[in-house]
Image (cartoon, helix red, strand yellow):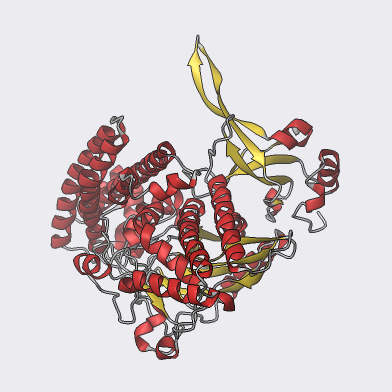
Amino acid sequence: MENNHIVPDNVKSDYHTFIKWCIKNNIKEIGHTVAPLASSKLRCKPINIEEFSEKIFKEGSELDGSSFSTGGGRVVHRAKVIAKPNQNGKWFVFPDPIRESSLFIMSDMESPQGYAMCARKPLTEAVEYLEKSLDGLMIASGLPKRHPNEKYTLTVGYEKEFFIVPKESESRPDIRYLGQTVAGGYGAINQNLRGVYLTIPKRNEEALLADIVKDLAKVGITAVQKHLEVGQTGNELKGRQCEIVLKYADAVNATDNDLISRQIIEDACDRHGFRALIGSKSFTDDTNGSGINGSGKHTNLSIGKFDSTTKELTENFFETKEFCPTTYHENISVIGLALLAAMGRIWQVLDASISSRGNDMRRRPGFEAPIYLSAFIGNTSEYRDSVSQDRNRSVSIGLSGNKLELRTPGANTVMYYPLAFLSIGVAQVIDEITEAVKKIIANGGTLQEAIDSEYKRLREEVDHFIVSENVYELSKEEAEKRFRCRVPANTPDALTVFDDKEATAFLVKSGIFTEETVKAFKMVQLEQYVQRVIAEAITLSNMAKSLSNKTFKSSIMQIAPSSLAEIDPRLKKRQSYLGHLNAELIDLADASYTEDNENRNDLAYLIKAIKGIKDTEKSATKTTEELLPLMEKTRKVYEKMVEIMGGSEEVAKL
């Protein structure tokens, strides 16, 4: 393919020119690629290039719905949803050799009436909403207009963490089907910097990371950093945690790049004999299932003037002199503080938008990414080298002069909706600043006086969640008191904020969302949560069943190994691994087998009951109140059996 993986902008506007480019580059199939609300990955249904008509090129393709039976046959239910190509999005070919004949077009999914049916379009509209607010502020401040090629936007740079484990780890059902473990043991080391973080990778790890960076570059995504992270899997799976840092881009394209890079990472890992695990929490560190190993997606944010041609930030409004105060030593402008204030106002909504089953396991007191809103302004000489800063581990956001780092999203959290909510929130704060500037200047004041006044007002508003002390180990009760916000117990609890019309009024005010679409967002997230927990419960139940059978057979074998060998000759081969077993082990294994069978029966009953509930909110309640506690009980039985058998490596031999 002559290493050409991106469709040039001048080819996107004409169908015949586009088809010629595809033929020249050996493209066999083309598909509109969308980011559904209920997915952490891109979705596409490519069609043969001969079927890709000019109408599909210009208007998009209609997506099929589910098939249903009728009169002894089956027909396809027309979904009446259109995936429309986005001229500003990326049209690309994945670098993996198996995928190099397929072209993917970033598209927006819409209803026939033009309503957004995907996660991507609301962010596009929200960023435009923010741009109008910034235009208003520039005019009120008497600053020069932007060039036609420039736009005011939210810029985003993602730090992507993920685990790599050997492909043979897929023998575990949870790794194969869920991309994370549902049970585990202690890690070999704790989370620390010495001897782990930024160490030189092994050759096979280095080769993998280098390959990922090369593949990203082929589709126009720059990785500004690659390295090992502190997470590790211990002896159980022999895995390591890695991180790829993507260069910033405007919010929509940056989030497109985030999803595209996920597929590239998975493809490269597969070629190198690894499995990529991009779950929020992949491993258990302790018997309570709450340890430290987890992957996040740190989201670095700024607001500024972005050149659409060069794809560069030409001015960062966090540092613009005209917006900086004169009476404060903090090196941040009123625009940066507006973003921080917006987060404070909409935190419960923003937090709910990034909640998920994986994040429930990862974000709690004692984790790197707390569930409450706290901020560290680590840009002053007093705190820059402070021990209490602790690399901002005690805060969920770090404001460091020219950017804001949001630490709470999990690695597989798709950020279109959270960034849309945030863009709307900060736009409305900027509107307040604009009105204040107009009023003060109209009354004979200066722009600097207006900026100083607004900075002081907003700084006082956010003061209660600005920290310089270590709040890493705060309990739920302490956090709620300290930061004046409610800490949800889980995702369903967090999502109740979308029932609060006052809390979501800022979304409806923008005109981008309605009360109905806000409610729909909540219900989709709830449904995803319930289905994820059910998938984990089924997998855990099956794993416990398999292990308890092996444990039971192994313990019996010590009593009558010859008889068992006659029933199943393969059991005789396991005898060498069972010499250390004793009577106590036999009793425990027998008890675990019995208890586990009871738990599995209860799990099966509960799962069936939850699936039969048509009301999503009721099924979510039953999931959190009954299914999760029973899963925890089953997990403890499973881990006890692993301990009885001498650890996961001994279990693998069975």
Residue depicted at 44% across the width and 54% down the height: 179
- Indicate left or right for 516 with 152 as reference: left
Report whether residue 406 is seen: no
Q: Return the residue found at the far front.
A: 443
In this view, the residue farthest toward the top is 71
In this rendered view, identify the residue nearer to me: 636 or 120. 120
Left or right: 521 in relation to 602: right
- Residue 599, located in which quarter of the rendered image? top left
* Residue 16, image x, y percentages: 85, 39
- Relative height, residue 645 to residue 633 (above, below): below
Q: Using the image as rendered, state which of residue 193 and residue 158 is in the foreground.
A: 158
Above or below: residue 639 compared with residue 329 = above
Question: Is residue 313 found left or right of 588 in the rendered image?
Answer: right
Quadrant where the C terminus is found in the figure: bottom left
Q: Is residue 363 above or below residue 61?
A: below
Q: Nearer the viewer, residue 330 or 236?
A: 330
Which residue is more in the foreground, 99 or 405?
405
Residue 542 horizontal side relative to residue 24, left or right: left
Which residue lies at the image location 25% right of the left edge and 49% below the top edge?
628
The percent position of residue 145, horizontal first and vertical second, equals 68, 64
Residue 69 in view (yes/no): yes
Residue drawn at x 46%, y 77% is: 452
Residue 306 is situated, as x and y percent measured from the top left of the image, at 66, 64
In the picture shown, does residue 249 fall above or below 553?
A: below
Quadrant assignment, res 586: bottom left
Task: Indicate the position of residue 500 as horizontal and vertical percent values.
Answer: 31, 46
Report the number of discs.
Answer: 0
